[in-house]
Image (cartoon, rainbow, N blue to C red):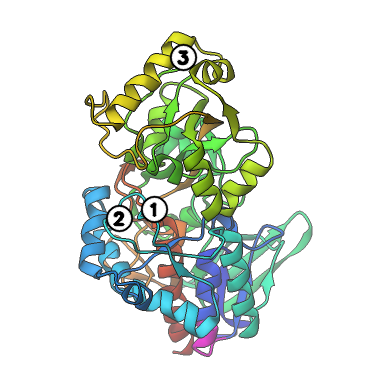
Amino acid sequence: MERDVDVIVVGAGGCGLTAAIAAAEAGASVALLEKEDRAGGNTWLSTGSVPAAGSRFQKDAGVDDSPETMTADLLRKSGPHDAEETVALLARESAALVEWLVDDHAVDLQLITDYKHVGHSITRLHAPAARKGEFLVKDLVAAAERLGVEVITGNPVAGLIVEDGEVVGVRVAGERIEEYELRAGAVVLAANGFGGNREMLSKWIPEIAEAQYFGAHGSTGEAVAWADELGSPLANMGAYQGYAAVAYPHGSIVSWTTVEMGACLLSPQGKRMGDETVGYSAFAPVVSAVTEESWVVLDQRIRDYVKGNEEEFADLVGIGGVVEAADEAAVAAIIGADEAIVTATLGEFAQAAQGQASDDFARTDFGFGALQKPYFVVRSIPALFHTQGGVTVTDTAAVARADGTTVPGLFAGGGVAAGVSGKDGADGYSSGNGLLTAIGLGRIAGTNAAQTAAR
């Protein structure tokens, strides 16, 4: 078969970049196509945190972990779903994945030891020092370029070329380029999910369809649709990652470490809405069911701790997104709520944190303990970050058909593939699940796509 390149990767986020690196490392020539003008996708917008069990970084820190423990943690959070085998696969591969990125490709990933984050019983998140996904993206781009892979931005793939049931290339078309075809021995779909497609959201996840979307604009679901048309069963399509508190109008996340250290969220009426420690994703629909905006209330200890550890939160503090409030009356004034209600809410929250009363929402973890004056307040809104459903893939990241066969020449990872965050809703999401399937399946897909092309 005539080909222009060995492997085509569609999408240059974390999944696509990792797939390109793996394919090039295996000796394949790679075309990495990105519809937007910049590589990164949702990975750029993330904290860059990749969970890994049994890594040498954990061992160096005295952390005892295993793929079995990680699998159990993720399934405990997600509940039963359609991609449980993928959970076990990624947990088994996770330590080698992180070590490969760090040791072989100079990607800055360090074990986060000061918190576990949602869904994990053990400290296993590995992230850039700044805990910002843009640094992970920059490192991955540099690694790809060292292997001779160019990120071709502004080149949106409009469809797959399929001949005799086999995927043999892609068709590229956009407003600013002349349409062309590119042929290859294998194609990797790494174009993320459908968070930016209101029609697909209304069909599959109506509960979050009207929420503000804070993911990458290029995540419009076409790659999921292409694989679906080729007979791949869709799985876990109702699952998604939400975020309960995006700073408004600033647009950056209010780090959930604030909640883990003892912050709470208040409604416009000055009342709490639930147990915030269920996680930033699980709490998003709780907030959206009550209000379009809320307020995160913390204290100076929490502000200074998170500011000192997380650059994005430090930036939010620097631009005035974290407002000081001397007392309950000042908090009420910022929110526009009744002072008596805010005073009662924060008083009851303090009693629960001190163990003097049970929490109305059964919250048991209060981090540093009761909030101390002065308070600090962040105005926020709930949002959708990315979808977690997609097409069925095998343990080689090949796109599977309903009859158990695979689509020849087609692989998928990241948001295109079925995620590991449960069947429906936002409460099955554990921290790092999105990057786990992106980076983890990306490496597997790239390696196997190169092998397919070589055959």
Lateral position of residue 74 relative to residue 156, left or right: left
Please name whichever residue, 186 or 118, is drawn nearer the observer in this view of the structure. Answer: 118
Q: Is residue 25 magenta?
A: yes
> Which residue carries the number 2 mark?
120
> Which residue carries the number 1 mark?
431
State the separation of the CA atoms marked 1 and 2.
8 Å
Report if residue 307 is visible in the image.
yes
Secondary structure of the residue carrying tag 2 is loop
Secondary structure of the residue carrying tag 3 is loop
> Which residue carries the number 3 mark?
269
Kind of residue indicated by mark 2: His
Q: Earlier in the sequence, mark 1 or mark 2?
A: 2
Secondary structure of the residue carrying tag 1 is loop
Lateral position of residue 426 relative to residue 48, left or right: left
Image quadrant assignment for residue 82: bottom left
Q: Are marks 1 and 2 in contact (CB under 8 Å)?
A: yes
Answer few, some or many: residues within 10 Å of disc 3's Cα (few below 14, many 20 plus, some between 14 and 19): some
Residue 43 coordinates in the image, percent (x, y): 54, 58
| Residue occupying image coordinates x 48% and y 11% | 339
Report if residue 384 is visible in the image.
no
Q: Is residue 424 magenta?
A: no
Answer few, some or many: residues within 10 Å of disc 1's Cα (few below 14, many 20 plus, some between 14 and 19): many
Range of residues picked out in magenta: 23-28
State the separation of the CA atoms marked 3 and 1.
30 Å
State the separation of the CA atoms marked 2 and 3.
33 Å
Kind of residue indicated by mark 1: Ser
Kind of residue indicated by mark 3: Gln
Lateral position of residue 29 relative to residue 419, left or right: right
Q: Nearer the viewer, mark 3 or mark 1?
A: 3
